[in-house]
Image: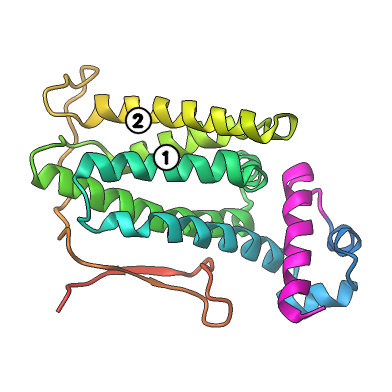
Amino acid sequence: MAKRDRKDSILNAAETLFALHGYEGTSTRAIADRAGANLALIAYYFKSKEGVFQEVVSRRATALLDRVRVLAEPIDPPWVRLNRFIEETVQFLVAEQPEFSRILLRESTAPIGHEHTRSPMRASTRPLREVLMRIQAAGRAEGEFKYADVDLCLNMLLGVALMSAADAASQSPSELSSLSRRAAELVASAFRGLLAKGQPTAGPLPESPPQPSLPVSTPIDVQTDRETGTLGPDATFQIGEID
């Protein structure tokens, strides 16, 4: 078996076990047994269980970013880009990668102190935030959007997607596809209420100060792990001017 295939086999086994039992409930021995691999290969490829977890999260986050990164650029009107961002994210998390979603949901609600799992998860959401912030900046610049906190918007989107995927194991692919569409429609409706000009601001609290405007035609430079090409816990995201 080729090196890439062996690594993928280990990562696939780890993803299933992390989704079922959580990080703490999964041993490297169990991962090796499920993958049909020698335990020494885990140490060779990933150093530790923490390294396995980081790459499980990184490879899925990279795949999702590859789907939505183009939406950071002004290729379509802001509302079209926003709807596509919602649809692509929910489709990926609910219908295509529900095990990954269950890992994120499980570990995000784990006891405080699990920094070894939360650090790669934070790294996985930072580039999504950059894309969403760019879309919102374009919408405000064109007078289509009013201000809404980007972190709250992203948390709403991810919360709906992750909760929708929570019991995905009991549903068929067609049921998951239908669930994904309904979840995306729910989030899109909520975003319209939050962002559309002319909609009243809910609640008595004053609106937060606007976020700094971002140039809408500058690229997001994602610095990934040099060896794997995926997002690691120390990945950085830079916005630079186009020459």
Q: What residue do we see at 16% from left, 36% from top?
A: 145
- Residue 243 shows up from this direction: yes
Give the left or right position of residue 179, taking residue 210 as reference: right
The stretch of residues the image draws in magenta is 1-26
Q: Give the colour scheme shown.
A: rainbow
**Upstream in sequence: badge 1 or badge 2:** 1
Give the left or right position of residue 1, taking residue 57 as reference: right
Amino acid type of the residue tagged 1 in the rendering: Glu
Q: Secondary structure at mark 2?
A: helix
Could you tell me which quadrant the N terminus lies in? Answer: bottom right
Q: In x, y percent, where is residue 43? A: 79, 76
Q: What residue do we see at 70% from left, 32% from top?
A: 172
Q: What residue do we see at 45% from left, 53% from top?
A: 125
Whether residue 218 appears in magenta in the rendering, the answer is: no
Q: Secondary structure at mark 1?
A: helix
**Image quadrant in which you'd find residue 108:** top right
Whether residue 25 appears in magenta in the rendering, the answer is: yes
Q: In x, y percent, where is residue 34? A: 88, 58
Q: State the predominant SS element of the stretch in magenta.
A: helix
Q: What residue do we see at 16% from left, 43% from top?
A: 139
Q: Label for residue 87?
A: 1
Tag 2 residue: 188
Could you tell me which quadrant the C terminus lies in? Answer: bottom left
Answer few, some or many: residues within 10 Å of disc 1's Cα (few below 14, many 20 plus, some between 14 and 19): some
Where is 128 relative to 42, above or below? above
Give the left or right position of residue 175, taking residue 226 as reference: right
